[in-house]
Amino acid sequence: MDIGLVELRQQRLQKLFDDCQQQVISQVIGPFGLSVAMFEDRNGGNVTTVHNFESDDVDISYVAEKDEGHYEASRSKYDRDNIKQLSKKKKDDLKSSGVDGYTGKSVSPSDLEADHVTSLKTIHNTRKNHLAFETGDGYDRLSAVANSDENLVATHRDVNNPKRAKDIIEFANEEVDGKANRDKLGLKDELMLAAKQRSEQHLGSTANRAILKKQAGELLQTGGKQAALMGLRQSLGLLLTELVNGLFNEFKVLIKAGVEAGKTLFEEIKERLQRVIASVVKKIPAAASQAFQGGVSGFMSNLITFLINNFLSTAKRFVTIIREGLLGLVKAFKMIMFPPKGMTSSEALQEGLKVLTAVVVTSVGFLLQESVATFLKTLPFLIPVADAVSGVLIGIMTGLLSAFLAYQLDNLFARYRYAYDEKLLDAIATDAKLTEKMAGDLVVASEASLSSIAKYRESIKSYEKTGELLGAAGRASQAMASSLAQAVESAKTQVAETKEMISYLDETNALLDDFFGKKATE
């Protein structure tokens, strides 16, 4: 086997052992150690939601401790005496108009009575109102809303007495002796609908505003507390993990190597402790960063738990999972999306997946912890320490499993990179062959170009000689033209002379003819 592969395998195994140690210590100190001591997670989270408050499928532990009294009051039987009655002044003011609010007719004030459009019983039996108005023994705030002007109408006693706690539209539709109350009492639909709409809108908006104000304040308070605790836990966890790891490694080396020559055991231990403390001090800036991240995670997990509980009721284990898991998710997202300097995107993805794996394993561990603790409590001698022991056992198991899965991820990415490197080398080799062929073609083309250039040079020389010959021919032609011009001029002169000679001869011939003619006649 190749020596390099053997060394690589040994390095990976050593890294696995180191990661197991690191993960086990981190899990035992962090989620299954400090978290148990610092956080008291409860069913439904830290802020009571309307969903949990109204639900009959959950027990009171889904309601915050401060809301337990209101929770019980919302499920108690309606008792009219618990809600304050209208004052005499308010009744008189309401009746002084002398107009029936449901019929629109003028009525003697002595015959008018104050009617609660939405009945006191309906208001009491709407559980949301008890959470909104924090009703207790006094029912003061609930009474104030129930007896508000928007929920009161002055009507004739003949309407108010039979209506009692019924809805006004429901009462108007009821038939008595074959005749609807609407027709029998002269009730007008537009007045009844307007009164009902005004009442329901006022009661609903008032309750919603009260709940929003209540929950917003509690979210800030509990979120701040969760942020502080989570920040403290993260910073302490990092420093304690560094301390325990350092002590473990230093004493492991001490046991293996022994005391250095010339030193006492006390001096050796003191020196190693100083090194450990120095390494812990160096981690303080990182602990401060972890405190900030933990604070953000603590606040956000509290908010997310609240949002979830508006639709689903979460058990306390899921509250813990949300808090611990959110921190891991933030770390993984930050690692993948914003890799540290000097880390490639592939390496960042690898580290991010390892963090996500640890989150999943830890979440499963939280779900199993309660079952393990319950099992341990079946052993009488473990009952006092069952919760602590279960935390340690689950912490060790999740730490080892997280390290093993991280090791498998490293191997997977290593195989992927090796296969990728092989493909890359093949591609490079193929590219080299293509490059070599292209270079050969370029050489051939270059040689052809050089040959063409040489021929061009010879052609240019030939053109130059031809030019010289043409120049000489031109010059010869010019000389010949000059000679021809001279010959023409000479010929012209000779012709002129010849003409004169001929003329002279003609004259001489005429004289001779005349002479010989005369001789003949004589």
Image (cartoon, rainbow, N blue to C red):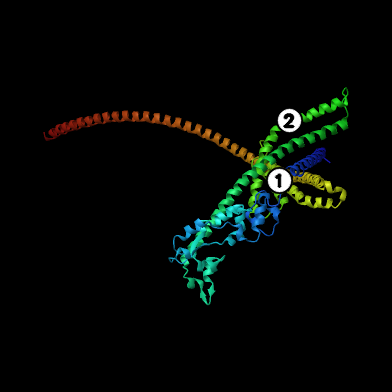
x and y percent of residue 502 in the render?
Answer: 22, 32
Can residue 158 be seen? yes
| Secondary structure category for the residue under label 2 | helix
For the N terminus, the quadrant is top right
Residue 123: assigned label: none
Question: In this rendering, would 295 be left or right of 200?
Answer: right
Q: Residue at x 53, y 33 (%)?
A: 457
Q: Is residue 196 above or below residue 292?
A: below
Task: Inspect the image, locate mark 2, and give the three-letter code of the amino acid beneath it.
Answer: Val
Instruction: Quadrant for residue 278, please give it.
Output: top right
Which of the two residues, 182 or 80, is positioned nearer the viewer here? 80
Q: Residue at x 68, y 55 (%)?
A: 313
For the C terminus, the quadrant is top left
State which tag comes first along the sequence, 1 or 2: 2
Q: Is residue 262 above or below residue 310?
A: above
Which of the two residues, 307 or 195, is positioned nearer the viewer here? 195
Question: In this rendering, would 259 be left or right of 109?
Answer: right
Could you give the CA–CA distance between mark 1 and mark 2, rounded to whole angstroms? 26 Å
| Secondary structure category for the residue under label 1 | helix
Residue 324: assigned label: 1
Which of the two residues, 145 or 480, is positioned nearer the viewer here? 145
x and y percent of residue 280 in the render?
Answer: 75, 32
Taking the view exactly as shown, the residue that stands out farthest to the top is 262
Residue 281: assigned label: 2
x and y percent of residue 123 in the render?
Answer: 58, 59
Q: Residues within 10 Å of mark 2 (few under 14, many from 20)?
A: some
x and y percent of residue 465 in the render?
Answer: 48, 31
Task: Inspect the image, locate mark 1, and give the three-letter code of the amino acid beneath it.
Answer: Glu
Taking the view exactly as shown, the residue that stands out farthest to the left is 522
Can residue 431 be seen? no
Q: Residues within 10 Å of mark 1 (few under 14, many from 20)?
A: many
Q: How many marks?
A: 2
